[in-house]
Amino acid sequence: MAALITLEQINKSFLTEEIETRALKDITLSIEQGEYLSFSGPSGCGKSTLLSLLGLLDVPTSGRYTLNQIDVSDLSRNERSRIRSTRIGFVFQAFNLISELSVEENVMLPLTYQPASVQSGMKDKVRDVLDKVDMLHRCNHFPSQLSGGQQQRVAVARALVNDPAMILADEPTGNLDSKNAEAVMALLDQLHGDGSTICMVTHDPASAQRASRQVELFDGQIVADSQRSGRAQIQPGSEQPSLAGEGVS
Ligand code: ADP
Ligand code: MG
């Protein structure tokens, strides 16, 4: 089966005041459906940039990105936004709920971009996902009436409501105390168990270990990529460990 996502030789540079920052350098990565990846590494190493590219919020400077066997590296803004709103669920560190909308209305929002055929079953779908994150009893509340952990669970429901091909989470527990963080991590575990594909940025080693595959970035490059079983893969373009002194020469 073809991978859900392939990134080939992806580069991303930002140009500000004549200074070029190479945020991502020759990233090659393939992600299968149902995988749960964590991306970690020091601040500024390119984690958020990589997640933005995966989420079609931005385009690479060079390289090829294939999603569901479609080359999405070079789509127009409109085409990217259509795929993004129907196929990708986002969870952000700051929850990003709309304060004027109720829980139910916030979760419904992504569905308003869907065709009318999908919208007809909208209410049921919203209730389903709110139930899944155990927030159905708060559907008429407003974000300000909820704890951080509850708000993030609502944000996860919003990410799930259009049955996305993948969920992208950037530091989803970064603004939470440890108890609420654990509830959100447990929710991601559960979604992974149910078959969701998840890419999560985190700088917390314990959270990274919850994922089934850990990818480490340093200075815009992938420097480690390992499954929880301990199998390690070396990416093309990254530093190869020296074999000097091993075996016969
Ligand atoms: P991380 O999420 O790992 O902390 P980022 O992906 O946010 O890192 O940033 C990677 C590098 O790219 C940093 O040097 C950052 O300053 C730079 N960068 C990110 N976004 C922009 C932007 N929009 N304009 C200019 N530089 C940027
Ligand atoms: Mg970041």
Image: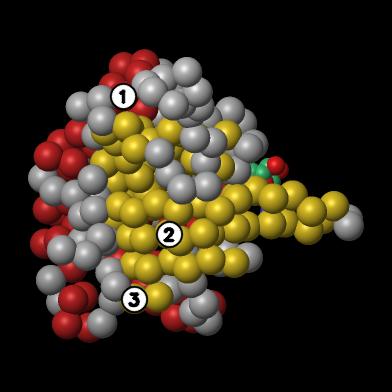
CB of mark 2 near ligand 1 (< 8 Å) = no
Q: Are marks 3 and 1 in contact (CB under 8 Å)?
A: no
Between disc 3 and disc 2, the foreground one is 2
Quarter, ligand 1: top right
Dot 2, how many residues are within 10 Å of its Cα: few (below 14), some (14-19), or many (20+)? many
Residue designated by label 2 = 7
**Residue shown at the point (47%, 18%) measured from the top left:** 245
The coloring applied to the image is secondary structure
What secondary structure is found at the residue carrying circle 3? strand
What secondary structure is found at the residue carrying circle 1? helix
Dot 1, how many residues are within 10 Å of its Cα: few (below 14), some (14-19), or many (20+)? some
Q: CA distance from mark 3 to mark 1?
A: 31 Å
Amino acid under label 1? Gln
Amino acid under label 2? Leu
Of residues 31 and 139, which is closer to you in this image? 31
Between discs 2 and 1, the one toward the N terminus = 2
Amino acid under label 3? Ile
CB of mark 1 near ligand 1 (< 8 Å) = no
Residue designated by label 1 = 209
- Picture coordinates of residue 136 (x, y %)? 17, 44
What secondary structure is found at the residue carrying circle 2? strand
**Residue shown at the point (27%, 61%) measured from the top left:** 4
- Picture coordinates of residue 206 (x, y %)? 35, 19
Question: Which mark, residue 70?
Answer: 3
Between disc 2 and disc 1, the foreground one is 2
**Residue shown at the point (88%, 55%) measured from the top left:** 17
Of residues 54 and 77, which is closer to you in this image? 54
- Picture coordinates of residue 151 (x, y %)? 36, 38
Residue 80 in sight: yes
- Picture coordinates of residue 139 (x, y %)? 23, 47
